[in-house]
Amino acid sequence: MQNKKINIGILAHVDAGKTTLSEAMLYITGTTRRLGRVDTRDAFLDNDEMERSRGITIFSKQAQLTYEDMEITLLDTPGHVDFSAETERTLQVLDYAVLVVSGADGVQGHTETLWRLLKRHEIPTFLFINKMDQDGTNKEKLLEQLQERLGEGCQEFTPGLMEIINEVRPGGAGSMTDTGAASDKDKKAMELLEGLRMYAKSREYPKEFGARVYKIARDENGTRLTYLKVTGGTLKVKDVLTDAAEKVNQIRIYSGAAFEAVPEVQAGTVCAVTGLTQTFPGEGIGAEPDSEIPVLEPVLTYRIILPENVHANVMLGKLKELEEEEPQLHIVWNENLREIQAQLMGEVQTEILQYLIKKRFGVWVEFGAGKIMYRETVSRAVEGVGHFEPLRHYAEVHLLLEPGEAGSGMVFHTKCSEDVLDRNWQRLILTHLEEREHVGVLTGAHITDMNITLTSGKAHLKHTEGGDFRQATYRAVRQGLMSARAQDAAVLLEPCYAYRLEVPTEMIGRAMSDVERMCGTMEPPEQEGEMSILQGIAPVATMQNYQKELQAYTSGRGKMSCSLSGYRPCHNAQEVITARNYQPEMDLENPTGSVFCAHGAGFVVSWDEVEEYMHMDNTLEHVMPKSHGSNIRLTEDELDEIYVQTILPKKKPESKAAKKVSFDKKKPKPVEVIYNPDKKPPLKEYLLVDGYNVIFAWDELKELAEISLDAARLKLQDILCNYQGFRQCHLIVVFDAYKIPGHVEEVEEYHNIQVVFTQEAETADQYIEKAAHEMGRKYHVTVATSDGTEQVIIRSKGCFLLSSRELKEEIARTNREIREAHIDNPQGKEKSSNYLFDHMPEELAEQMEEIRLGRKNMDQVKGNPSRQEKYGADE
C-alpha cells in the first residue's frame, strides 16, 4: 500500500507553544534524537542566529517526518504578527494546518486572523490546545469560546485517540524520557500525529506539470533558492520552467538547515530549486495560475539611515535583493525627501531587517521613527479624463471612479462599447490600471477600496501606440482624483487594529477612557471572573504603543492582542494632510494634467481645464462645471492636418486664452492667441542638451568618439560655448555617468556653459526630465535630443524641443551669422550689434578663435589624462 503523503503547516499566536509541539513531533518520529527548546536556543527549526537569540520564529522552515505509513512535510511558520505575511505565503502550499491555541490565553486576536486566512485559503485545520496544565484553565469554557469565536465546527475528539494510542502503543513507545516513560507533551504530540494519520488524506494531482512558488531565499553561499510545491506532474533537474528559458540546476529537499539533492520530485512535494532568477512568491509555473496578493500588508514606513560612507544608490540596489525575498518589505526611494524607506509591519521587523543588512552586506543601518502608511479613496462617483496627444501620438481615456467596500482593494471593469473603442485597446487600458499602484492627491498615498470603470475612449487609426494609452490612463486616474478633491469627495484612510483588552475589573473605566482618547470604538465590556474584556476597533496611529502603558497601570496583569482590521476614514485627516504638505501638481511621476496638440506641437493642459479640450463627451454628467467655452471636436482629417504640420516655429501657449482652440469646418487650421511681448517681459531662456545623444547623432563627433570619447565631449562643449556666446541663453549640457559606481552628481562651469555629469543610477534623460519640469513653468526651456521617448515626455512638460539634427542646423546658422558679422566683414564690426567677441572677455575670445582654427581638442585630452580615465571611452 502506498504511503500517505501530506504537507502540514503549524500556525499559532506568539507564545502559544508552537515550537515545543514541533520539536515533540520531530522527536517522536525519530527525525531528531533530542528535544530542542526555545529557552536553550537549540530548536531544530529555529536555526537562524536571530531566531535563537530572540526566541521567536522569523522565517518559515520545513522538516521531513515519517510516522507509520505517513510521510509528512512539516512547515513551521512565524507566530509574531510582524511576520504574518511570511505565514500567509506558506499557506499556499499546505494540504492541512494545525492551529495551536494556548489554553491559558484562549483565542487571541491574531488567532482569529490566522483562522480567517485558513478559511480564505480553504485549508482543513486541526486545532491543538496547548498549556491546559496551567492554573486557571477550564476545558469546557475554552471549548465554548472556540465555538463562539472560531465556529461551531470546533469539536473535541482526543479521548478516543488516547485510548487507541494506549492500546496499540502502551506507554507511548517511540518517545521515552530518561525514566522510560512517555512525557505528557509527547503523548499529546502523538495524539496529534495519530489524528492526522486517521483523518488526513493524500491529495490527487493532475498529470500535467504545475508548481506554485511560495518563497525566495538565499543559502549561506548566496545561491538564490526558489521554494515551491509541485502541483502536477514531475519536476526534474534541467527542466526549463520560466519564460526566460531558465533551467533547474538542483532540486533540494530541506529538513531544518540540511538538505538532500534529488534528481526529480513528484506532485505534492515541497522543495527548493536553484537556477531560477526571475521567480517570485505567489507565481504559478506551468499549469498552475498565479495566486492572489496576500491580504496582510505593512502599515508603517521607516526611513533607513545609512552610514556616511555608504551611498544611497549603491545600498538601494542591495536592499532590493532583500525585497525579492520578502515582498511585503517594500523598499522604496522617496525622490522628494531623497531617502530610502522601508514599509514594514512593526518595530520587531526593523530589528530583523537591521540584522539581515548587517549579515548580508556588512553595513549597520539605523531606522527613523515609524510613520503610518495611509491610503486614499473617494466618497462618491467622479469621472476622470486623460488625454495624451504630442505630435504623432494620440489616446483619450474616460474613467468612472466609485467608492468600493471597505477592504475590497482596487477593482477594475469596462462598460465601454466596442463600437466606440476596440476591445484590444480596452484590454490594454485595464492592464495599465492594474500594473501599478496609483497614488492619491491628498497625501500622495496609494489609493484603495475603489472601483474604476472604463466608460469611453478614443484611438487614432495611424498615430496611436500602446504607450499612449498608458499615459492617458494614468492621467485619467489623477484627473478624476483631483476632481474628487475639488468636490470634497477625496477621503484619507488610516490602518486600524481590531483589539482585545483584558484588564482587572476595577480598571475597566481607565481602559474605556483610554480607548475613547485613542479615537477607538468599543463593545460593551464583558466580565470573566476578576477580569473584564474590552473589544473594538482603534487606529494604529493611536494604539501602536499602548501595550507598555497597559502593562504599567495594571502592574503586568493586563493583556492586549491586536490584529489588522483594514483601512477606515482617518480620525485626524486634515492634520495629516497639512503635515504631509503634498503638492499633487508638482509630482513629476504622476501628472494630473493632459497633453493636447495645436500647430503641430504638444502643450500641457491643467487638470481643471481638460474637460474644455477633450474630444469626447462626459460619461458622467455634472462632474465639473465648465467655466467657459465648449469642447473641441476633431475629425480624423483634422487630426491628420495637425500631425503633418511642422513643429517649428515653437510657440508655447502663455495664457489660458492661448490654450483655447476652435476649428472652422471650411478652414481647419487652428486659431491661437499668441503671447504679446508688450504685456510681459521676455522669459529667461534655457537650453538643455543631451550630450551623448548629440555626439552620436553628429557624424563628425561620432567619428571622433571612436578615437577618444573625451575629445568628442570637449569638442561638443567648445561648440556649445561658441553658440552660447552668440545667443546669450543659459546652456546646460548633460552627460550620463550612471554606470560609475558610487558617483554623485557633478556640475562644472566650463567657460560660459554648465556641464553636468549625472549621479549613479540616474540617466541624462531622467536629469533633463526633472530639470524641464522644474523650470518649464517659469522659463523658456528648450531641450536638444533625438531620443523619441524623451521627446514625448519633454513636450508633455510644456517645453520646446530641438532634435540633434535641428541643433546642428541651428549652430550652423549661428556660425554663418558670426562669419558675416566678423570674419567676412572685419572692418564693419562696429556696425554689428551681434558681434560675438564684443560680449566676451579677451581670454575667452582667444579660445573661440582657437576653436575656429580647429587646433585645440586633442591637446586638451593629452594634457588632462585624469578626465579621460574618469569619463573616457570605457564608459
Image (cartoon, rainbow, N blue to C red):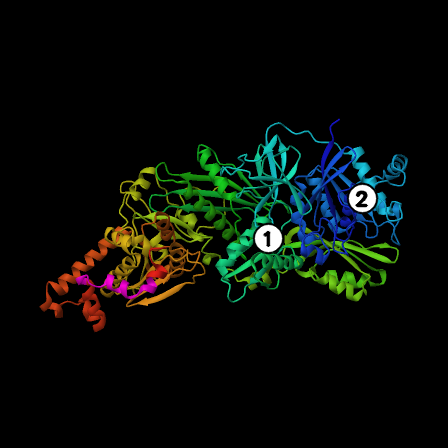
Q: Residue at x 51, y 54 (%)?
A: 317
Q: Which residues are magenta?
A: 852-867
Q: Quadrant of the C terminus?
A: bottom left
Disc 1: CA contacts within 10 A as few (<14), some (14-19) or many (>=20): many
Q: Is residue 114 left or right of residue 443?
A: right
Tell me how far mark 2 sits from mark 1, CA to CA: 31 Å
Decide if residue 207 is in sight here. yes
* SS at circle 1: helix
Q: Position of residue 27 (x, y in %)?
A: 79, 44
Confirm whether residue 649 shows in the render: no
Q: In this view of the protein, which residue sits in the foreground, 275 or 192?
A: 275
Q: Is residue 323 left or right of residue 596?
A: right
Badge 2: how crowded within 10 Å, few (<14), some, or many (20+)? many
Q: Amino acid at mark 2?
A: Phe
Q: Estimate the x, y position of residue 41 in percent, counting from the top left.
A: 74, 55
> Quick one: SS at disc 2?
strand
> Is 812 part of what is drawn in magenta?
no
Q: Quadrant of residue 452?
A: top right
- The residue depicted at 48 percent of the width and 47 percent of the height is 384
User: Which label is found at residue 575?
Assistant: none
Mark 2 or mark 1: which comes first in sequence? 2
Task: Report whether 302 appears left or right of 701.
Answer: right
Prevailing secondary structure of the magenta residues: helix
Q: Which residue is mark 2?
A: 128
Instruction: Identify the residue position indicated by label 1 in the image.
Output: 329
Give the answer, above or below, for where 718 lies relative to 83: below
What is the residue that sits farthest to the bottom in this orientation? 842
Percent across and percent down for residue 383 are 50, 46
Q: Quadrant of residue 829?
A: bottom left
- Residue at (57, 46) in percent of width and height: 224
